[in-house]
Image (cartoon, rainbow, N blue to C red):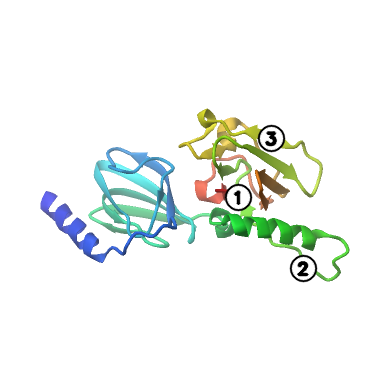
């Protein structure tokens, strides 16, 4: 068995492309022995993950919205899904918006500016702006600790949320989890996230609930 795994890893190493800086997926769960990978890590295309006996990992892909639970074997991270040898993979398509999960800072600022221009009542004939959408009422926000996160409702009245991002409340050192903090937003609401000079307009899907939601469906990257 060990020789088979070694052969599989060798084949993956030959096939794997150079690691890209842009992450392809986020690690939602890790069970058992998985070297070099932790909960909430990003993984890039070309990353090889070896799962020990009875070990498993759950990956959520940012571009394809594929959620994979992989048991044992060797995993080669792709751009939209994994290739798995000597293991078992279960895939499901989950609700997510790639614009929310993969937005750059420049795109975030442009998104907010474009949204507010389009929402103005004096812009006749302008189509409604399509805001990046979250599919859970409790966002998972990637941001640097040490600053203050402000969330404002833009299409109705709602108390402003202001959170000093102290390192001790950040999951994995870089995520603020509304679910863990016991905070929620309103289904169907439109919001502005403010983090320093960044402005990011987004909306919560009208069908969003407080039930557990895959990370990729509620991920908002402000960093």
Q: Kindly give the residue lying farthest to the right in the view shown.
A: 122
**Rendering coords of residue 152 (x, y %):** 73, 43
Residue at image position (57%, 34%) is 146
Q: Secondary structure at mark 3?
A: strand
Q: Secondary structure at mark 2?
A: loop
**Rendering coords of residue 181 (x, y %):** 59, 31
What residue would you read off at disc 2?
127
What residue would you read off at disc 1?
135
Front of the two marks 3 and 2: 3
Residue at image position (11%, 53%) is 3
What residue would you read off at disc 3?
162
Residue at image position (35%, 45%) is 57
Quadrant assignment, res 101: bottom right
Number of other residues with Cα within 10 Å of mark 1, as a class: few under 14, some 14 to 19, many 20 or more: many
Distance from disc 3 to disc 2, alpha carbons, whole Å, reads 31 Å
Quadrant assignment, res 115: bottom right
């Amino acid at each position: 068995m060990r020789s088979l795994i070694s052969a599989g890893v060798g084949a993956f190493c030959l096939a794997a492309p150079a690691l890209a800086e842009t992450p392809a997926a986020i690690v939602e769960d890790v069970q058992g022995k998985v070297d070099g990978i932790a909960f909430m890590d990003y993984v890039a295309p070309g990353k090889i993950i070896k799962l020990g006996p009875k070990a498993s990992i759950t990956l959520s892909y940012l571009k394809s919205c594929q959620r994979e639970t992989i048991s044992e074997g060797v995993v080669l991270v792709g751009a939209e899904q994994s290739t798995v040898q000597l293991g078992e993979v279960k895939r499901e398509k989950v609700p997510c918006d790639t614009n929310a999960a993969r937005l750059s800072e420049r795109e975030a600022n442009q998104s907010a500016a474009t949204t507010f221009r389009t929402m103005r009542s004096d812009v006749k004939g302008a189509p409604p702006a399509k805001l990046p959408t979250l599919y859970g009422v409790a966002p998972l926000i990637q941001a640097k600790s040490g600053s203050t996160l402000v969330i404002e409702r833009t299409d109705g009245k709602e108390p402003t949320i202001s959170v000093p991002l102290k390192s001790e409340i950040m999951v994995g050192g870089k995520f603020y989890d509304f679910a863990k903090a016991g905070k929620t937003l309103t289904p169907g609401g439109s919001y502005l996230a403010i983090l320093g000079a960044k402005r990011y307009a987004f909306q919560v899907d009208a069908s969003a609930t407080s039930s557990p939601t895959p990370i990729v469906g509620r991920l908002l990257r402000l960093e």
